[in-house]
């Protein structure tokens, strides 16, 4: 009798858990709305999605003015131009591919309302959860750009126990704050990503988006992700298991490109991208999945990659179109928007304008988005900090450190508060092995930008590779001071 009651209780508990899991898997339940309503009746970004680009729009589009929703990652959000300091007197929109798209369509005589649902660091799981909310905006079309962030959360993706696939476990960890405490770690040859599972999840989310868009009768445009192939080395490129690891493939690609063999160079650069032990650029399997899902009647492929290849000065995109590993510069953003605008005309989302392939000149865009020399100096500082982070991950002085130093030195000349980059210079000095120079930079930052020292302290507490930059030199960062290890 007692055993029966125990079995009944266990069965009831399991049933309740399964029902709860099923409910949590319903998009309307597990996903907070990205929209909050103002007293005026317009929609703005909700606090639940604070990472999204800010927006304000009417619940329904204006008649005769099609609404285009462009969803994606930091490339769509406009990074690094989205990192500009807030200026109360500034009215220009942030430079981003969606805002360029609005400019292009306006110049062609077919103005549209382009809505940006994008955020730095967002991946396919979050975009899939946002997708029903995008459909609720009654768009004329949805454009999706994704693929670069599928390996971003290294600590979580390297450790994929069965229970991590349960929404109930995800909500419980979030409620208890456990994910915020997880320590990201670098992948090693002995501890690799579950590439097959990541690809399967990615393809399933794409297919779900396509089916939902088809059911709603909304055209879906899937963009091929683009990246800096020619000028950006892998992040964690050494791998003794391979006859040619990512670092060696990238070096070979550079030699082939210098020799003029563009086809072979491209193949080598793509091998370097795909063999990176911590991919920060969409890999070939992910790119192929996008093309595969977009190959049916219910979605359209926007071949942004082909447009970048054609526009690249060397036939393989590099710093001629990118700010870093995957974020386009002003010209690259313009090219993304132009390619999407052409695809919208081809899909008859907007009327044929007779100006296919045309877009406002780059200088007109810089003026429209209010990008002067001061703003561009700030962008160089943002990119310099990014490169410092990459360099610290590699643990050595190399291409990333050189890129970082060049950007930071150029930025300082135009910055109002050059002390904001002192901690970045300190990390570069640690890569050189000059502890005293690093300490001097930290001391100056403490006087001029103490908030940056506090950020560095938090980074050291969270990321093992950040602590390693100090520990390799026999020191540590304690309460904003560089002190000997164990002191």
Image (spheres, rainbow, N blue to C red):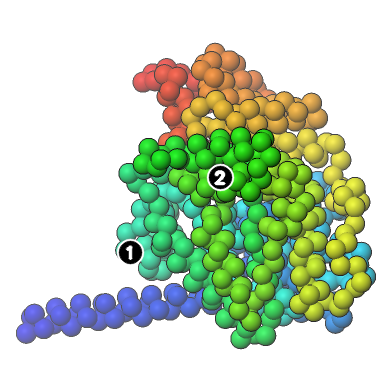
How far apart marks 1 and 2 lie (CA) works out to 38 Å
Check disc 2: other Cα within 10 Å, few if <14, some if 14-19, many if 20+.
Answer: many
Most extreme residue toward the left is: 1
Q: Is residue 333 left or right of residue 234?
A: right
Residue 276, relative to residue 6: is it above or below? above
Residue that lies at the very extreme toward the top in this rendered image:
436
223 or 480: nearer the viewer: 223
Which residue appears at 78% of the width and 31% of the height?
Answer: 415
> Label 1: how many residues lie within 10 Å, few (<14), some (14-19) or many (20+)?
few
Position of residue 98 measured from the top left corner of the image (x, y, whole percent)? 76, 61
| Quarter of image, res 319 | top right
Instruction: Count numbered badges in the picture.
Output: 2
| Residue occupying image coordinates x 18% and y 83% | 8
Rendered location of residue 392, percent (x, y): 52, 32
Which labelled disc corresponds to residue 163? 1
Query: Depth check: 337 or 33 in front?
Result: 337
When asked about the image quadrant of residue 165, the answer is: bottom left
Instruction: Name the disc covering residue 268, or none.
Output: 2
- Does 82 appear above or below 251? below
Which sits earlier in the primary sequence, circle 1 or circle 2?
1
């Amino acid at each position: 009798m007692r055993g029966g009651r125990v079995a009944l209780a266990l069965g009831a508990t399991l049933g309740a858990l399964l029902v709860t899991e099923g409910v949590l898997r319903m998009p309307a339940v597990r996903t907070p709305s990205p929209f909050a309503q103002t007293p005026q009746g317009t929609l703005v970004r909700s606090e639940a999605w604070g990472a999204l680009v800010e927006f304000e729009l009417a619940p329904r589009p204006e008649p005769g003015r099609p609404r285009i929703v462009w969803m994606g990652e930091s490339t769509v959000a406009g990074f690094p131009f989205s990192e500009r300091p807030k200026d109360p007197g500034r009215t220009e929109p942030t430079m981003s591919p969606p805002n360029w798209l609005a400019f292009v369509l306006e110049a062609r005589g077919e103005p549209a309302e382009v809505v940006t649902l994008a955020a730095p660091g967002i991946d396919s799981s979050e975009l899939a959860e946002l997708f029903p909310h995008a459909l609720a905006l009654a768009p004329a079309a949805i454009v999706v750009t994704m693929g670069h962030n599928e390996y971003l959360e290294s600590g979580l993706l390297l450790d994929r126990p069965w229970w991590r696939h349960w929404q109930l476990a995800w909500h419980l960890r979030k409620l208890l704050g456990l994910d915020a405490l997880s320590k990201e770690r670098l992948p090693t040859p002995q501890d690799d990503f579950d590439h097959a599972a990541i690809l399967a999840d990615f393809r399933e989310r794409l297919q779900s988006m396509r089916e939902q868009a088809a059911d709603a009768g909304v055209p879906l445009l899937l963009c091929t992700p683009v990246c800096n192939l020619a000028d950006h080395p892998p992040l964690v490129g050494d791998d003794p298991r391979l006859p040619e690891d990512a670092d060696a493939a990238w070096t070979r690609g550079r030699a082939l490109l210098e020799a003029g063999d563009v086809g072979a160079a491209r193949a080598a650069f793509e091998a370097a991208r795909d063999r990176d032990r911590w991919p920060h650029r969409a890999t070939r399997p992910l790119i192929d999945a996008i093309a595969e899902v977009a190959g049916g009647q219910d979605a359209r492929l926007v071949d942004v990659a082909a447009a970048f290849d054609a526009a690249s000065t060397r036939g393989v995109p590099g710093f001629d179109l990118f700010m870093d590993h995957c974020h386009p510069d002003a010209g690259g953003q313009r090219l993304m928007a132009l390619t999407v605008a052409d695809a919208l005309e081809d899909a008859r989302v907007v009327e044929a304008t007779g100006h296919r392939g045309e877009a406002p000149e780059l200088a007109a865009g810089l003026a429209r988005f209010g990008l002067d020399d001061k703003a561009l100096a700030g962008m160089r500082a943002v990119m310099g900090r990014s490169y410092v982070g990459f360099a610290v991950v590699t643990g050595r002085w190399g291409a990333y450190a050189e890129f970082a130093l060049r950007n930071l030195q150029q930025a300082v000349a135009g910055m109002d508060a050059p002390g904001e980059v002192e901690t970045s210079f300190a990390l570069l000095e640690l890569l050189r092995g000059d502890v005293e120079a690093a300490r001097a930079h930290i001391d100056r930052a403490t006087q001029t930008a103490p908030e940056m020292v506090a950020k560095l302290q938090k980074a050291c507490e969270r990321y093992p590779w950040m602590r390693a930059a100090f520990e390799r030199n026999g020191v540590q960062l304690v309460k904003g001071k560089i002190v000997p290890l164990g002191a």
